Structures are given as structure tokens and as C-alpha cells.
Image (cartoon, rainbow, N blue to C red):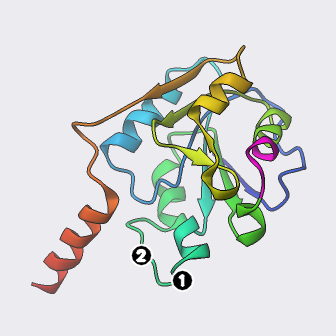
Amino acid sequence: MKIIRINDINKKYITEDLAVCIGNFDGIHLGHQALINKVLNSSLKHGLITFDPHPIKALVDENYKTLMNINDKIEYLSEILDYLIIISFDLSFSQKTPFEFIKFLELNQIKEIVCGYDFHFGAKASGDVYLLKKYFNLIHFYIFQVLLYCIKQSVLKILLEKSALL
């Protein structure tokens, strides 16, 4: 797996057509696994775009805990995907417009995107899956909900923290 760390979204890093899933993947639960499996069904090279640190940690609470850190993600995904794209998340990146992020995706050969129904991007989370679908009208976007298997990360973290205290 090629690991690409992105510090400048105006730069080209990838020259192969990719199918990617995009998200924080702060714990790879069954919903995340479903997204990854959808990417693996593509005939293109397979990738995942994630953010480090987690946006909440970068902008709201530096003590925010995730179930998996970036090294855990790398270890988990290393035998599954062709690319792991890690975008450095900071205040500057959080202020990028949705169209700046879309331009980054186009520049880096992203052809298919798999994301959760609630994926948002760009300044103040102003971009969503419907904007992606509209903007890339010639590209297939897989938007689906995994409701029965998806446990909200915060609830799972609370349960795990409580069990660690017992």
C-alpha cells in the first residue's frame, strides 16, 4: 500500500485512476468496512482518504480520543488497499471551500467515491454528497446508509471507556 501524506491540496500526488472511500475512519466499524468493501469491488485501484488529526481534535478538543490512531489505520489497511491518502487536517485546511476539495479530487485521479450518507466537507461542512454527485455528474458515486450495523462512534467509545474502568 502506498501511503501519501497530503499537506498541499493544490498539488498532484497520484497518477492512477482511483476508487476511494472518504472519511475520518476513527474506528473501522462495520459501516466503515462496508464502505471499504464497496471500493474493493471497483475495477480501479483502491484507496481511502482520511484526515489526521481527526477534525474534532484539530479544531475543538485536542484531547479528543479516537478508537484508532493513524498508525492503527495504516496497520489495518496495509494489506487491503493500494493507497492510503492522509490529509493533514488543521485550521487552514478546514477553511478550504468544497470546490477546492473537489479540485483536489479531480487533480489526483479520483474517479469513484464511496462515502457515508452524512459525509460533509469544506469550510463549515458546507459540501455534502449531493454536491459531489452534482459536480461529478459523469462519475459514479455510491451513497448509502448502513443503519443496522453502524454504532455511533461516541456511544461505542463511552462503552469501551466504562468497561476499561471496571
109 or 139: nearer the viewer: 139
What's the mark number on residue 62? 1
Residue displayed at 66% across by 31% down: 132
What's the mark number on residue 65? 2
Image quadrant in which the C terminus is located: bottom left
Quick check: is 99 in the magenta stretch?
yes
The amino acid marked with disc number 2 is Lys
Q: What span is colored magenta in the figure?
A: 96-101
Q: In this view, does 119 lie to the left or right of 157?
A: right
Residue displayed at 77% across by 50% down: 97
Q: Which residue lies furthest to the left in this view?
A: 166
Seen in the picture, residue 166 relative to 158 is either above or below; the reply is below
Q: Is the magenta stretch mostly helix, strand or loop?
A: helix
Q: In this view, does 149 lie to the left or right of 32?
A: left
Q: Could you say whether the residue bearing mark 1 is in a helix, strand or loop?
A: loop
Query: Residue 101 placed where, x, y %?
Result: 76, 45
